[in-house]
Amino acid sequence: MNMSNEAIQWMQENWKKSFLFSALFAAFMFGGRHLTNRRAKLELGKPLVLWSLTLAVFSIFGALRTGAYMVYILMTKGLKQQSFYNGPVSKFWAYAFVLNKAPELGDTIFIILRKQKLIFLHWYHHITVLLYSWYAYKGMVAGEGGFMTMNYGMHSVMYSYYALQVAGFRVSRKFAMFITLSLITELLMGFPHFQNVFWSALMFLSYLVLFCHFFFEVE
């Protein structure tokens, strides 16, 4: 059994663990906020810069590898022959993409310990992306490769921005607005690419509404 088959088999047997991770995340999130109410906030500047840089570098490599493979597939076989789940290059980055949705929940730890505002969009997005990514991977949903490539690209920019901002570099507010607009564009492009249309459309529609609301709120 090759690596891609083992990964798909593992996910098919264990994808429901994403609900456990989400439950633990929610318990920590609400419990952590309660426990830190009477404590002084922690700055955690250097750990947060390192965390953001790590995710940025990971996303940059993911975007380059999946992007190059996506171009190759589109030029040679077309969208219906993506084979993203078992392609020679993409199989690793597809598996890494869905697994990484669990450690990405760590973003919230910094928000809680630094006593920043924890908005609904943040934790809702983290939980639903984790659940849907694991579900889509175990079912080898067609079109997921396009979403992975776009998401890798957006996270490359987003986490690089976070790292620069926390490190003390002055980054234009317009750049943050550009990231939000790009995320909205990504969501609009994501609508037609999934087989399980109802649930994916419902999730993406909720993201679209929430990100649009966030964009006009911070403008």
Image (spheres, rainbow, N blue to C red):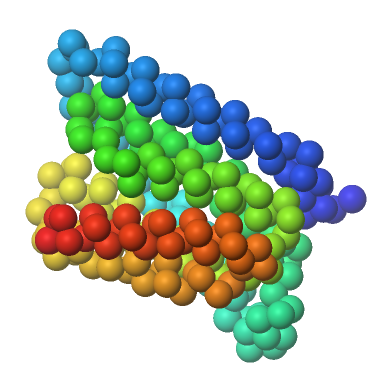
Can you say whether 116 is above or below 68 in the image? Answer: above
Q: Is residue 28 left or right of residue 81?
A: left
Is 45 drawn above or below residue 7 in the view shown?
Answer: above
Which quadrant holds residue 199?
Answer: bottom right
Q: Quadrant of residue 20?
A: top right
Task: Please state if 122 lies on the left or on the right of 9 as rendered.
Answer: left
- The quarter of the picture where residue 104 lies is top left
Q: Measured along the vertical axis of the image, is residue 201 above or below residue 108?
A: below
The image shows residue 39 at horizontal and vertical percentages of: 19, 12
Which one is nearer the viewer's eye here, 103 or 57? 103
Up the image or down, 36 lies above or below 49; here it is: above
**Residue depicted at x 58% and y 50%:** 132
Residue that lies at the very extreme toward the bottom in this rendered image: 75
The quarter of the rendered structure image containing the C terminus is bottom left
Where residue 175 appears, x then y in whole percent? 19, 64
Q: Residue drawn at (50%, 49%), measured in percent from left and top?
A: 129
Q: Position of residue 182 (x, y in %)?
A: 32, 68
Out of 146 and 57, give the one closest to the viewer: 146
Q: Residue at x 54, y 45 (%)?
A: 130
Query: Is 13 situated left or right of 167 in this image?
Result: right
Residue at horizontal 37 percent and vertical 72 percent from the top: 185
Taking 53 as reference, is 142 left or right?
right
Work out whether residue 110 or residue 17 is closer to the camera in this orientation and state it. Answer: 17
Q: Is residue 8 visible?
A: yes
